[in-house]
Image: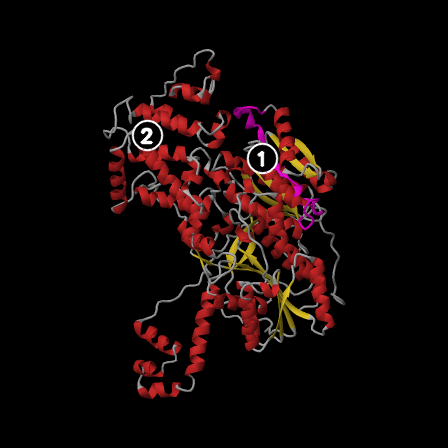
Amino acid sequence: FAGQPTTHVDLPTYPFQRERYWPEAADTSAPELSAMSPDEAEFWQAVESEDLDALMGTLDKAEAEPLRAVLPALASWRRNSRDSSTVDGWRYRVGWKPLPKAKSADLSGTWIVLVPEVLRDDATISACGRALAGHGAHVVTLAVSSADAERKALGGLLGEVLRENGTENERKLSRIGGVLSFLAVDEIPDRAHPAVPAGVTATLALVQALDDVEIQALLWCATMGAVQVGAADRTVSVAQAQVWGLGRVVCLERPGNWGGLVDLPADGVDARITDNLCEILAGRTSEASDPGAGDVGGAGEDQIAVRSAGAFGRRLVRAPLNGAPAVRPWRPEGTVLITGGTGALGGHVARWLAGRGAERLVLTSRRGAAAPGATELEAELAGLGAKVTVEACDVANRDQVAALIERLNAEGAPVRAVVHTAGVSAGAALADTESAAFADVLAGKTAGAAHLDELLGGTVDAFVVFSSIAGVWGSARQAGYAAANAALDALALRRRARGWAATSVAWGQWADGGMAAGDTGEQLTRLGLAPMAPGLAITALQQAIEHDETPVVVVDVEWPRFATAFTTLRPSPLIGDLPEVRAALAPEEDAADGTSPSTGADRAETLRQNLLELSGPEQEHLLRELVQERAATVLRLAAPTEVRSDRAFRTLGFDSLTAVELRNQLGEATGLRLPAALVFDYPTPTALVTYLRSKLLPEGDGTGTEGGPGGHDDVDEAAVRGALATVPLDQLRAAGVLDTLLKLADRRGGALTPLPAGDETESIDEMDADSLIQMALGDGES
């Protein structure tokens, strides 16, 4: 405004208050292939195959002859166009959607707030604690030292809180309003596993300890600057981002007790932000007890960033290029370092780079030239004109990485680009995940990337890391792997904020090898995650580099199948805005208690007739074998006997995805239309067998008489005993068994026989059904 008549106006002394009223536009960017007529299809088939004779058959000879010279170019264009369209359908990115304000921020009950001992006086954490108390919560703060940040010790601290707050029985247990953990904010190296932040291993231990002491309240994990919502978030904490990857796995494996992830600004909070935090906690907590209650962004918001402008929910959105030209056409120059270079993915990348004229390729792996297929790959790449070096180098070892880079510099061949494909994957349920194994998986992926980032800095013109969809939306039994890949995405964002080259591609399943090979790949395919052809995946990789993208997701998803399984036990706003997901999850008539038509009904009748020929114990034995066999198949166990009748499905490793797969298998075997949450409604094989038997042999079908074998009392006794045999009585409601007992009581007319005096210690096997139900309900409850 130099030279212009202007007036200075004081700004208001309070922040601007904004509220959006514009509706959000629907995402209509899903690629659609228009249907071609038979003549068009024949024409383009002839073009793609460069078959001039066939082409002349679709056109007049005079029209076809001029195409002879341009046919190769036209065929290449057609193939590239179709490939680009296919790849566009695989491309997604993570965005953030403004969330509406909650109607209330009122909290109740005891809130356990866990903070690292070294940060107990942190201003942000203290402000949040005061805000919770100001909104009605009774706050119990646990300062966790490095010595206490392990499973058993944390269990002891939590158990002490329960004792102090009088929560020994089920009714008093509800006084725990929630658990808010700031353990993730501790970024110092773990004492036992220096390659992993202490806050990450402590969070894993907390998840396990909460299950050990049977606290059913929702767990929220808070971070500070772990995600990037907009340009104002100038940097990202790679250490804390790992907890976001871990949390997505917790959501899948313990959905009923998971609150979510909430990220606060790295530079501190004010009253607006802490009030917003309380609104989020209050909305999600009320929703847990009343599915229609949540206010913040709709049901199930569990990945939220709170900023001065408000709360934002994490969303997966489509990111097609639609033919946009490259931002910076890139060809490899000088030396390209490929970690995990002798593996399946590294091999595909190496062939692509060699074909694009890379002068020198350095392939690293822990075994180097001794790795299977390394010698053959080296010869193949040399045949493509590249100078190839295969090095034995553990990229998780900083000294080895530094020595390799220093030697290449001394040889006059400095690294000009790096592609980090190395990684380790080891599956285990959260309850069974050992901290050492968890740290090994994390270090195998994150430590190597961190060393390369530190040692190469901004000297490279391409810094590409191979991430995974496990870090985007979680993967059951892959806690360490999901955390590691979330860290890679954060590392790329941090490099980009510094002005350095960085691209992180979160891959779905590759065909012909990779982490998802074998049984894992087959399971992913059944869930709707199709393997991607390596050639097309490489096309997506080249596009990501040349369009200067930082994080991008590339996955081939059959959304109707995947979304149905993924949202079985709780909604997922992360994928909920995708049009295909909205269509797949549209409300449908619930036919969960009926039988499938035609062949399904036939199978049910055949199985029913077989059961009628057996005695009660034999019926249970047959159905138990069926359940154990199908459960072992889904979990890839060596034998059905590994599925113990008295062990909960959740502790066996079932999550929302595998639960749906077991439901489908049992539905196919029995001909019944079964509920998606089958293994969680009936938490053990024994309880599930009882349910299946009741559906196949309902009352009044001639299978028995009232009170006799196979009759009313027999079925009810089995249901009650099966449910109670493995669940502590003071946890019946939390385990979801109490509703079943109430239904049984209702079927018996609602009349319960009072317990005789002195029978409090009577064993379950000596009690009748009325006594068991009376014990479960307790005095004064209905």
Asked if the stretch drawn in magenta spans residue 185, the answer is: yes
Residue located 47% across and 69% down the image: 84
Asked whether residue 425 appears in the rendered view, the answer is yes
Asked where in the image residue 738 lies, by quadrant, the reply is top left
Taking the image as shown, residue 145 lies to the left or right of residue 766, namely: right
Indicate the position of residue 519 as horizontal and vertical percent values.
Answer: 45, 53
Q: Kindly state the secondary structure of the residue where label 2 is placed.
A: helix
- Identify the magenta region: 167-196
User: Is 613 or 511 nearer to us in this picture?
Assistant: 613
Q: Position of residue 162 (x, y in %)?
A: 61, 27
> Farthest residue in the front direction?
370
Query: Percent from the top left, x then y, of residue 402?
Result: 72, 62
Give the residue type that dot 1 points to. Answer: Leu
Residue 65, placed above or below residue 147: below
Q: Is residue 714 magenta?
A: no
Q: Nearer the viewer, residue 518 or 231?
A: 518
Query: Residue 183 or 702: which is nearer the viewer?
Result: 702
